[in-house]
Image: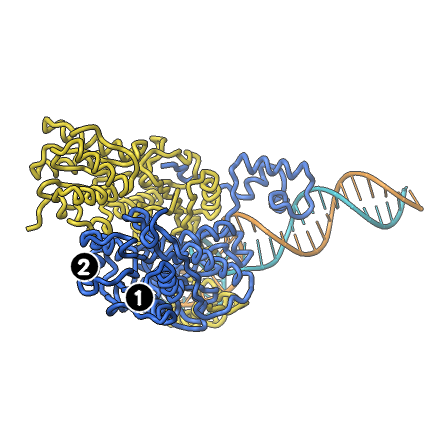
Chain colours: A yellow, B blue, C orange, D cyan
Amino acid sequence: MSDTTGARAVTLGDVAARAGVSISTASKALNDRGDVSAATRAKVRAIAEELAFTPNAMARGLLAGRTGTVGLLTSDLEGRFMLPILMGAEDAFGAGRINVFLCDARGDAIREQHHLRELLSRRVDGIIVVGRQTDARPSLGQEIPVPVVYAYAPSDDPRDLSLTPDNYAGGRLAIEHLLACGRRRIAHISGDPSYAAAQDRLAGARAALGEAGLELVGEPMFSEWTEHWGRDAAALLLQRHPEIDAVFCGSDQIARGVLDSARDLGRTVPDDLAVIGYDNWEVLATNARPELTSIDANLQQLGRQAALRVFDAIDGIDIGEGAHHLPVRLVIRGSTIARR
Amino acid sequence: MSDTTGARAVTLGDVAARAGVSISTASKALNDRGDVSAATRAKVRAIAEELAFTPNAMARGLLAGRTGTVGLLTSDLEGRFMLPILMGAEDAFGAGRINVFLCDARGDAIREQHHLRELLSRRVDGIIVVGRQTDARPSLGQEIPVPVVYAYAPSDDPRDLSLTPDNYAGGRLAIEHLLACGRRRIAHISGDPSYAAAQDRLAGARAALGEAGLELVGEPMFSEWTEHWGRDAAALLLQRHPEIDAVFCGSDQIARGVLDSARDLGRTVPDDLAVIGYDNWEVLATNARPELTSIDANLQQLGRQAALRVFDAIDGIDIGEGAHHLPVRLVIRGSTIARR
DNA sequence: GAAATCTACGAAAACCCTTTCGAAAAGGTA
DNA sequence: TACCTTTTCGAAAGGGTTTTCGTAGATTTC
């Protein structure tokens, strides 16, 4: 550990004294403000450098009324979706010289309230609330004195601004790709049907099929977002409906399970059976045999967008309201198109 | 979005004025300090509640000389290891009413310096530096005016305090478990040999084997930490050394690949071949066929410990120095012991 | 030489809170 | 009534910075 215990941090006053000028002159010299002679400026600069002076952001924020900080309030750090969103947001904020307070409510409403109070107490300039599912979540309310943007999980209050991936479009995209690959007998295996994500993707898929005058083969199969379920479901599906030529999976994990079962049952992918996943979880998708075509929700971009909205709001720009559905992206790999 | 634009945050002065008392009295009433009559206290409390007053943490910190914040400086948010460490640290700090600044250097030393300056400017009370590998990383230096703890990646300066998982013990643990399962002909497939983690685990494994009078079968195989490599390596290995009865894998991803190839080649796990992974990445381990025995580095615990050390240092307790190797844990699943 | 114009700097207020210390008011005792 | 004790409250300082405004000195202009 590094510690200069008891060593009070060096203040602007220290610099000024050492340079033989007043505090205000020192401040102006360091901030290129007001009238300071070049000689004085250089001298102050040199001393500040020598003493490793860093201005106290708190004192600064106290005056400015702005802290240059934002709160990132996550409902649950665990899980695959938080990290990219976090990265996108942190990246965008970092570029704007804003620091991020990370708060994890761990799925607990009480803890969320607690963290919210702390963030407000720290006078953050804005807040991003990141939920763990795309289902609507309770709004923090309209009484919050700073701008709030909801990411991934939209707020249930339409007056809030929410950014969430467009699962409906993702479902469409997946099916349209399978159709473009010449598939006509498509089944759907997904996860927990209580997730809005599951329902939205299914709805998008059905819409795309309907436009082509088709329907899903069999009923969509719901259970868990796991590889195990993907395996079990695929085994069942291929037994009941051996005629299918494609499976649209609700997640890459499920798709991995489907690939596994298909191989066990002697089906070759993609020739005999095309498989498309969802989430584009690279570790899973690129290590599958064959590599897995998937839908990418552009989560890092989503986090970035949320940050930019907060920026705008801080600058007094009206950022609008309502739930915005951000575009998703098809990533084509070998599980739907034979490798050249 | 929620925004009361232009609405200045309510200050203690506002509360005091509304309650008809002085600022100092209001402060004392809210903080249970000094002598305030019960009636006054109740009145101030009520008004504060009504106005949704939250004390300005900056102004408070300015006085106290402590901000109640720490910096979490990660070298790279991506990857599987950051999140649990983050969670552990955030959790421990949250319990201590400390807020966390999250900074992601994205593997860039310049950006790291930049973030470090910002953290110091914000007068954080301490810093945790989280690296992405267990290889030693450059120290931030001894000149930093707040305590620093290095997590996962140890500092290259022995005067710093570093907490890192005990990969050597992990290697031992894996082999000892395989030996306890009656295996004697054990091979090793790992990832990038330039990683200290790979070398340390191997060294631990060899030590445990040596104590049993055994050696690895064949040379340890190094390449990438991927499922693909696990598959390729296993195929090669089982062809060259069909006599092996166990494989110690450097990661769960590799182990998944090994399981895959073993199945393809008609080997049954665990009867015919035991497989043990590393990292205990639950999503991979519990969805494997059979489920994967693995070594868990207790990363959440590591993050937690790092936070506790920072706490101690803030409280003026000497937290010591040097690299501390934290214990790892064996998680037994079906890939080494047949299910009952 | 006096007045006007610049230039460079410093004093002080403001930001919001906590804490110390002194003062006033209320109550009790001789 | 005079004095003492206890209780309750407020004034003010302090923390580090930015910013406004005033002033002293230097320089120019007539």
Q: Is residue B59 above or below residue A163?
A: below
User: Mark 2 = which residue?
Assistant: B235
* Location of residue B272 in the rendering, given as x and y in whole percent from the top left corner: 27, 55
Label 1 Cα crowd, 10 Å radius (few <14 / some 14-19 / many 20+)? many
Count of labels in the image: 2
> Mark 1 and mark 2: span between their CA atoms?
21 Å
User: Mark 1 = which residue?
Assistant: B198
Q: Earlier in the sequence, mark 1 or mark 2?
A: 1
Badge 1 and badge 2 in a common chain: yes
Taking the image as shown, residue A266 lies to the left or right of residue A199, namely: left
* Location of residue A340 in the rendering, given as x and y in whole percent from the top left corner: 6, 51
Q: Is residue B278 above or below residue A165?
A: below
Q: Can residue B141 be seen? A: yes
Mark 1 — on which chain does it sit?
B
Q: Nearer the viewer, residue B167 or B117?
A: B167
The amino acid beneath tag 1 is Ala
The amino acid beneath tag 2 is Ala
Q: Can residue B114 be seen? A: no
* Location of residue A292 in the rendering, given as x and y in whole percent from the top left corner: 17, 46
Mark 2, secondary structure of its residue: helix
Q: Nearer the viewer, residue A174 or A222?
A: A222
Q: Quadrant of residue A198?
A: top left
Q: Quadrant of residue B262?
A: bottom left
* Residue at image coords 29%, 64%: B186
Q: Indicate which disc residue A18 carries.
A: none
Taking the image as shown, residue A330 lies to the left or right of residue A66, namely: left
Report the mark closest to the observer, 1 or 2: 2
Q: Nearer the viewer, residue A16 or A197?
A: A197
* Residue at image coords 35%, 47%: B339
Mark 1, secondary structure of its residue: helix
Mark 2 — on which chain does it sit?
B
